[in-house]
């Protein structure tokens, strides 16, 4: 249990996983994204999501190239585990931080959840590096910080 003096409003366990992390965990079962997804399943991290992020994950899982490369059971497992172990928030604000409009939902979700990190492989998000004390980093960086 944390002492009151060490508590901050940001918790390093609280994060938002980008869709590309979820898909990479599915395709590259031994990579950094898969290790991070395993931490989600083992409840070592607290992932926050939104209806918009969930819909994007579903859409990507149903893309022809993903269907060709992966088994239906694996896609179902990834989605079920993601939904089971993630907390859904409803962002109250919509930000326009990145020019790539579809990436803003990750920032909105992280702000609403008071997350410490957005973990992504997306260059548009990674270029921002930090927004409102939320660090935007790669899976390898998150795992490399002793998480």
Image (cartoon, rainbow, N blue to C red):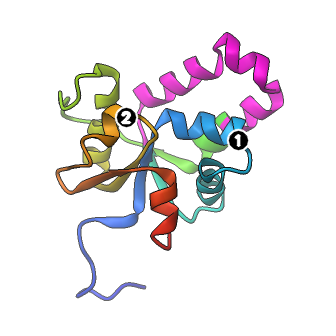
Image check: 110 left or right of 93? right
The correct choice, above or below, for 15 with respect to 144 in the image is above
The correct choice, above or below, for 60 with respect to 31 in the image is above
Q: Residues within 10 Å of mark 1 (few under 14, many from 20)?
A: few
Foreground residue among 86 and 74: 74
**In x, y percent, where is residue 18?**
46, 38
In terms of sequence position, does the residue under pointer 2 or pointer 1 come before the other? 1
Q: Could you tell me which residue is drawn at 58 percent across and 50 percent down? A: 85
Is 28 covered by the magenta stretch? no
Image check: 7 left or right of 58? left
Indicate which disc residue 40 carries. Answer: none
Q: Is residue 109 visible?
A: no
Q: Could you tell me which residue is drawn at 24 percent across and 73 percent down? A: 8
Determine which residue is flagged by label 1. Answer: 28
Q: Could you tell me which residue is drawn at 28 percent across and 20 percent down? A: 101
Image check: 4 left or right of 27? left
Foreground residue among 113 and 64: 64
Image check: 82 left or right of 10? right
Mark 2 vs mark 1, CA separation in Å? 19 Å
Q: Assign the magenta stretch its main secondary structure.
A: helix
Foreground residue among 29 and 51: 29
- Extent of the magenta region: 49-78
Determine which residue is flagged by label 2. Answer: 123
Query: Residue 29 sits in which quadrant?
Result: top right
* Circles 2 and 1 in contact, beta carbons < 8 Å: no
**In x, y percent, where is residue 128?**
24, 42
Q: Could you tell me which residue is drawn at 64 percent across and 22 percent down? A: 61
């Amino acid at each position: 249990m944390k002492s009151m003096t060490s508590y901050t409003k940001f918790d390093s366990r609280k994060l938002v996983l980008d869709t590309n992390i979820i898909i990479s965990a599915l395709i590259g079962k031994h990579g950094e994204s898969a290790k991070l997804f395993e931490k989600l399943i083992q409840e070592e991290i607290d992932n926050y999501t939104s209806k918009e992020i969930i819909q994007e994950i579903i859409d990507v899982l149903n893309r022809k190239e993903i269907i060709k490369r992966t088994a239906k059971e694996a896609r179902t497992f990834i989605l079920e585990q993601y939904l089971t172990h993630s907390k859904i928030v409803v962002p109250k604000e919509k930000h326009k931080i990145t020019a790539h409009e579809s990436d803003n939902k990750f920032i909105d979700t992280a702000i609403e959840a008071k997350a410490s990190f957005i973990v992504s492989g997306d260059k548009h998000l990674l270029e921002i590096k930090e927004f409102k004390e939320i660090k935007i980093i790669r899976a390898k960086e998150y795992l490399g910080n002793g998480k």
